[in-house]
Amino acid sequence: MIARSNRERVLQISRWLADKFPTPFPVTVRCPKKIAAIPGSGPLETKIGDYGTIIQHGHKIIINIAIRPGRSRSMIVDALLHEWAHAATIRHANLEKNRLNHDDEWALMYGKIYRSFMDDGGCKESEDY
């Protein structure tokens, strides 16, 4: 099924990602129009993740992907792939410290996800999710 909106496409790809790249904790993907500041990060202008954020609530992960007019679908999808790599590499110790780094483990996972989606047919395959 071809997604008509960016929101539909993000949710479609997130189902594909859940199937192909399982995460250690349950993930919910949301598509707000704006992403609010992370508590304690300062004023709204210093919000983290203009396109996407990942937030931990207990042992659940919430990924927010901003869907705003004028945003290209490719940038929105890239934000989802980026945040999913964080979700797939979260470990209990990182969860307790609320640390999500762009370390080697994240970079390798992001590379696997990106290659699978962009080069190995995931873009087309995800349309069936």
Image (spheres, helix red, strand yellow):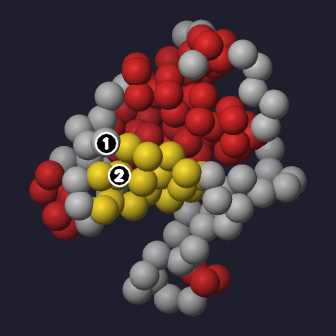
Give left or right: position of 100 versus 51: left
In the rendered image, is residue 89 in sight?
A: no
Specify few, some or many for label 1: CA neighbours under 10 Å numbering under 14, 14-19, or 20 or more.
few
Specify few, some or many for label 2: CA neighbours under 10 Å numbering under 14, 14-19, or 20 or more.
many
Dots 2, 1 in contact, CB < 8 A: yes
In the figure, residue 69 lies in which quadrant?
bottom right
In the figure, residue 50 lies in which quadrant?
bottom right
Q: Does dot 1 land on a helix, a strand or a loop?
A: loop
Q: Residue 104 placed where, x, y %?
A: 30, 42
Task: Name the residue: 17% across, 64% down.
Answer: 96
* Name of the residue lying farthest toward the left: 93
Q: In the rendered picture of this protein, how many numbered marks are placed on residues? A: 2
32 w.r.t. 113: above or below: below
45 w.r.t. 83: above or below: below
Which kind of residue does numbered mark 2 sit on? Ile
Q: CA distance from mark 2 to mark 1?
A: 6 Å
Which quadrant would the C terminus be assigned to in this image?
top right
Instruction: Identify the mark at residue 61; answer none if there is no mark.
Output: 2
Foreground: 5 or 41? 5
Q: Residue 121 placed where, x, y %?
A: 59, 10
In the rendered image, is residue 25 in sight?
A: yes
* Name of the residue lying farthest toward the right: 70
- Dot 2 or dot 1: first in sequence order is 1
Give left or right: position of 22 versus 32: left
Q: Does dot 2 land on a helix, a strand or a loop?
A: strand
Task: Name the residue: 35% across, 52% down.
Answer: 61
* Name of the residue lying farthest toward the bottom: 43
Task: Name the residue: 52% across, 33% down.
Answer: 14
Q: Which residue is mark 1?
A: 26
Q: Residue 103 placed where, x, y %?
A: 31, 48
